[in-house]
Amino acid sequence: MFDFAPADNGDKTALYRDLTAAVVAITDGERDGIANMANCAALMAEFLPHLNWAGFYRTIGDELVLGPFVGRPACIRIPMGKGVCGTAAAEARTVLVEDVHAFPGHIACDAASQSELVVPIIRDGKVLAVIDLDSPNRARFDEEDRAGIEAVAAILSSRI
């Protein structure tokens, strides 16, 4: 049985250290990428405060397709280069958006979302999926969040 919980001290460095340790532990030895994404979506939702959505979009052909997530029902397919997720995938780079309403072409799956962080999961130069985090708070994400979720993506690059 796994019983992962974030430290309740407000220290982001410790939070992301504990989150990445949990990601390593829960995915260790598991070969099923969908199972690993599902558990990691649950971990991110558990560890990261002020989220209304945490999950994955998988690269299938020339689009992103909804993967495991925690949150309200979401858009199922996103074309490459469209919205925050499609931009991150097409450009193979992290996209941090303080105000989604100011992002050109933002795709509103949940009207409550105000800010977003999308990190690609890359293996051998190919974007396999993206991690998508949404918050009902503007400017919820910062550079510590970017670095922490990029560390999660690096772990998952060999586990999905």
Image (tube, grey):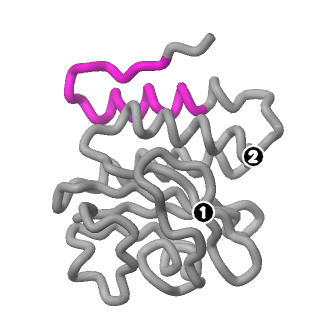
Left or right of residue 88: residue 139: left
Q: Position of residue 37 (x, y in %)?
A: 63, 45
The residue carrying mark 2 is 33
Q: Amino acid at mark 2?
A: Gly
SS type, badge 2 = helix
Q: Residue at x 46, y 31 (%)?
A: 19
- Gap in Å between the C-alphas at discs 2 and 1? 14 Å
Q: Residue at x 57, y 74 (%)?
A: 89
Picture quadrant where residue 138 is located: bottom left
The residue carrying mark 1 is 66
Of residues 111 and 93, the one nearer the viewer is: 111
In the displayed structure, 126 sits above or below 4; it is below
Q: Is residue 78 magenta?
A: no
In the displayed structure, 25 sits above or below 71; it is above
Work out whether mark 2 precedes mark 1 in sequence or the reverse, and give the earlier one.
2
In the displayed structure, 95 sits above or below 6; it is below
Q: Residue at x 22, y 65 (%)?
A: 114
In front of the other: label 2 or label 1?
1
- Work out which residue is located at the far right of the displayed protein and give it: 31
Q: Position of residue 61 (x, y in %)?
A: 76, 79
Question: Which circle marks residue 115 in the picture?
Answer: none
The magenta span reads 4-23
How many other residues sit within 10 Å of disc 2, few (<14), some (14-19) or many (≥20)? some
Picture quadrant where residue 115 is located: bottom left
Q: Is residue 16 magenta?
A: yes
